[in-house]
Image (tube, grey):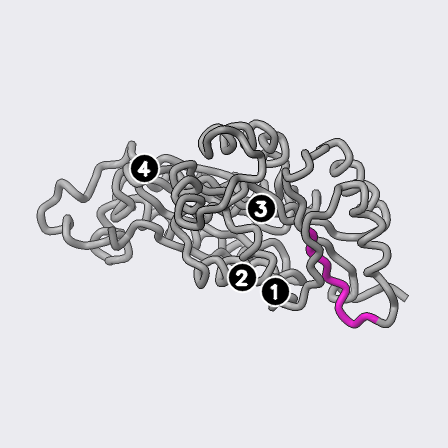
Amino acid sequence: MELAATDHPHVLVVTGMSGAGRSSAAKILEDLGYTVIDNLPPRLLVPAAQSHDIPEQRHKRLAVVIDSRGGLPIGELREAIKELSREGVMTRVVFLDADDDVIVSRYEENKRPHPLGHETISESIAAERELLSDLREEADVTVDTSSLNIHELRDRLTAQFSEEEMTRPMRVSIRSFGFKNGTPRDVDLLFDVRFLPNPHWVPELRPLRGTDERVAEYVMGEEAAKEFVDRADEMLAFLIPHFEAEGKSYLSVGIGCTGGHHRSVAIAEELRRRLAQHGITATVRHRDIER
């Protein structure tokens, strides 16, 4: 008999930069019902998943934390993920990241040594970035924790990896932001809408935000804005089914303007409405709207 979607085992491989919140993520996933194994060598990933997948278990959800403490043989990890896929186990690689200065600050506050043990924390961070660069590129989900507190991290992981969410079709997240506040690390696709006229220079619109109908009408009144949304909508409607066919479960789209108050907000909201017409549900988060 074919298994229901909720019966299929799945494995989350949690990795990323030291100081970016791996331990916190592990605790959150544990609260979500995952069995969590910390500091697992990649060669043991398949045996761990096989031993966890026993018929008596109602929930077959395993999260393993793999980090750079003992080096990270990415070839072994790739082979393990391929083998699990052949056995019908859904595997997702979750990469936790943060800005270098944020990681340095966290280590200084905790007064703990970096696991790579270079002379300075900055040197250790640089070495770890080099070690993990390929893995970051191949991750299914990247979470930038630079500006997240523990409650926001919990909300982000719950929204993506709770049992209910993991059995849904691909989740699409659209995030507006301002380039002056930094480009988010954890987006799969990024669009720059600074080519559109800026409502900031219209006195009566400046104090408003892109969620206001007057600002939205101003932004979408431009032919270039209409054409951009048409093309972005068409591209996403094409890409999403292909991503799903390849096993991708989460897609993050970034829309950026200068400050993240007007253009990116209005475009993100309009793109969500367009995707809904294709039956694609997208969540929208406006990162910088209150800055």
What residue did someone put label 4 on?
A: 179
On the picture, is 137 further left or further right than 82? left
What residue did someone put label 3 on?
A: 141
Q: Secondary structure at mark 1?
A: loop
Mark earlier in primary sequence (1, 4): 1
Contact? badges 2 and 4 (CB < 8 Å)? no
On the picture, is 8 further left or further right than 38? right
Mark earlier in primary sequence (2, 4): 2
Residue most extreme to the left: 203
On the picture, is 155 further left or further right than 241? left
Q: Residues within 10 Å of mark 4 (few under 14, many from 20)?
A: some
As displayed, is residue 131 above or below residue 260?
above
Instruction: Name which residue lies at 57% across and 58% down.
Output: 160
Instruction: Name which residue lies at 42% across and 47% down.
Output: 106
Q: Residues within 10 Å of mark 3 (few under 14, many from 20)?
A: many
Q: Residues within 10 Å of mark 2 (few under 14, many from 20)?
A: some
Mark earlier in primary sequence (3, 1): 3
Question: CA gap, disc 3 to disc 1?
Answer: 14 Å
Where residue 73 appears, as percent x and y from the top left, is 72, 33
As displayed, is residue 34 above or below residue 117?
below
- Which residues lie in the magenta part? 57-64
Q: Which mark is residue 159?
A: 2
Q: Which mark is residue 162?
A: 1
